Image (cartoon, grey):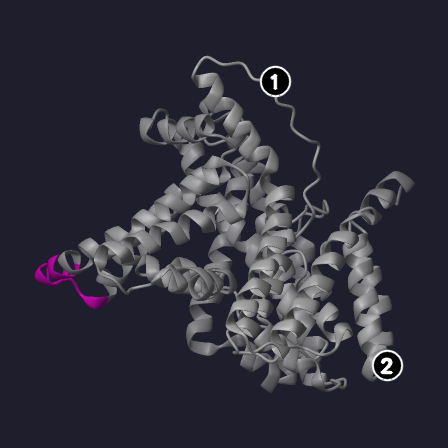
Amino acid sequence: MPARLLAYYFEKMIFNSLTFLVFVAAFLPVYFMLKGRARLWWSLAGSYLFYGWWDWRFLTLIAISTLVDYYLGLRMGQTEGEKERKHLIWMSMVLNLGFLGFFKYFNFFTDSFVSMLQGFGLNPSIHTLNIILPVGISFYTFQSMSYTIDVYRRQLEAEPSLLKFATFVAFWPQLVAGPIVRASDFLPQFQKDHDWDWNRFTSGTAQVLWGFFKKVAIADSLAPFVDQCWHEPMAFTSVNLWIAVIFYAFQIYCDFSGYSDIAIGFARILGFDFPENFRTPYFSQNFSEFWRRWHISLSSWLRDYLYIPLGGNRGGKLMMYRNNMLTMLLGGLWHGANWTFVFWGFLHGLYLIAQRLLGKSFGNLMRQLYFPAFLKTGINITLVYAFTCLAWIFFRSPNFGIATDVITNLVGFENFNYVSIMNKFIVMKGFLLITMLLAVEISDLKIQWGGVVQRSPLFRVASFAVLLWLIAFFGTFGSNAFIYFQF
C-alpha cells in the first residue's frame, strides 16, 4: 500500500477506517483482561483517544461538559429545595445548549441576521468566526442532558462516581453518532463487570457486519450517483433525478442505521445493551409510526424532554398541533445549521398535523373502496415513503435553490427513458443492493435472523462468511465519513 494512501486511512478514526480496526484490535483484549475501576479507566482512556483522534481540542469541551453535569447532578441529588434544584437544572441546560448553540449555530444565526439586514438595504460589516464544529456534539450533549433532567425529575439517582459518569458520556461506540443512550438505561450497566460471553460476541459481531454491509456496500455505493445529481441537478434528465432521490433515501438510511448497528454490536460485545435505533422505517403506514421507527433514540428524546413538557396532547387540538410543529422544527434545527434542515422539520411537522386532520377521512375512503388489506397497506407505505422522500430533498440540499432545481427537474419528466440514465451499471448495482436490503428486512419480520444466528452455530458461520463476502464484493472502500458525523 502506498505511504500516501496509508496515511489517509490512518488520519481518520471512523468505523470504516484502518485506524479504527487497529484501535479495536488493541482495545478489546485489554478490556476483557481488566476488572473494576481499571476497566473503567481503560474504557475512558480509549474513548478519549477515539474522540481526540479527530481533534484533541474537542476533548476540552467534552471534559468541561462532563465535569459540570456531574457536579450539578450531585448537587441536585443532595438538594431538597425546589427553587435551588430549578437553578441547578437551568445551569446545566444553559451550559449544554450554550456550547451546542455557539459551536453549531453562531455563524448560522449571524449570517441569517446579516442576510435579513441586507434585504432591508443595509450593508453591515459583521465578521463571523472560524468555528470548528466538534464531532458528535449534538449526540453527547443530549445524552448528558438526559442525565441531569432525569435527576432533576427524581427519576434517577445522581451518579456518585465521576469515573462512571465520564465513561457514560464519552463511551466510544456511540459517542459521535448515537444512538442517544439514556442515563437511566446505561449507567446501571456499569454496576458490574461484564465477562467475555461467546453468544454476545457472535450476535454483536453479526450486527457489526450487517452495519458495515449497509454502510460500505449500500450507502457508499449509492453516494457517488446522488452527489453527482445534487451537484448540478439541472444538468441531468428527470429519470436520473428520480433515481437519485430514491437512492438518497436509502443512502441516508443505510449510512445512519449502519452506524447504529455497528455501535450497538460493539456495545453488546463489551457487555452493554443499547436500545434499537431503527426498525424498518420505510415500512411505516403513517408518519407517527415512521418516527417510532426512525432514529428512535432521538425521536423518543424529543418526545420525553420537549414535546411532553410543552404540553403534548393536552390543552386541545390547536395546542397539540403547535407542540407537534415546534418539536419537529427544533428536531430539524438539531440536525444542522441550515434553513433547509428547519424546513425538513417543518414538512414532517406538517405531515403529522395533516395525518391527525385527514387520517379518519382517508381511512373511511379506503374502507369504501373495498381494497384488500395488503393493497391498503401497500398504498399507505407508498404514500409515507413518497412524502418522506420529498422532505429528504430539502435535507440533502445545501440551499433552497438546489432543492428547487431538483423538484423542478423531477416534475419536468423530460427524456424520462432508459436511454438517458447515466452510469447504468451503478444504477443496476444500487437497485440490486436495495432489493437485497428489503428482502432481508421483510424476511426478518417473520424469521428474526438475529435469533437464528444465536441458536444455530452452522448458520452463524455461514452468515459471517456471506456478509464478509458481500462487503468485499460490493463494498466501496474510501473511508467515507458517516453522514450524521456532521450533526
Instruction: In this rendered view, identify the residue nearer to me: 292 or 386.
Output: 292
- Residue drawn 76% across the image and 86% down it: 195
Number of numbered discs present?
2
Q: Residue furthest left?
A: 368
Q: Is residue 150 magenta?
A: no
Chain part drawn in magenta: 363-373
> Which residue is disc 1 drawn over?
125
Q: Rounded to the nearest whole Å, what is the CA distance between mark 2 and mark 1? A: 57 Å
Asked whether residue 464 appears in the rendered view, the answer is no
Q: Residue furthest right?
A: 3
Instruction: In this rendered view, identify the residue nearer to me: 140 or 347.
Output: 140
Q: Quadrant of the N terminus?
A: top right
Asked whether residue 425 appears in the rendered view, the answer is yes
Q: Secondary structure at mark 2?
A: loop
Instruction: In this rendered view, identify the residue nearer to me: 335 or 256.
Output: 335
- Residue drawn 51% across the image and 37% down it: 338
Q: Is residue 110 above or below residue 191?
A: above
From the top left corner, tell me how far across and down residue 85 is, in percent: 56, 69
- Residue drawn 66% across the image and 81% down it: 189
Amino acid on which the number 2 mark rests in the picture: Leu
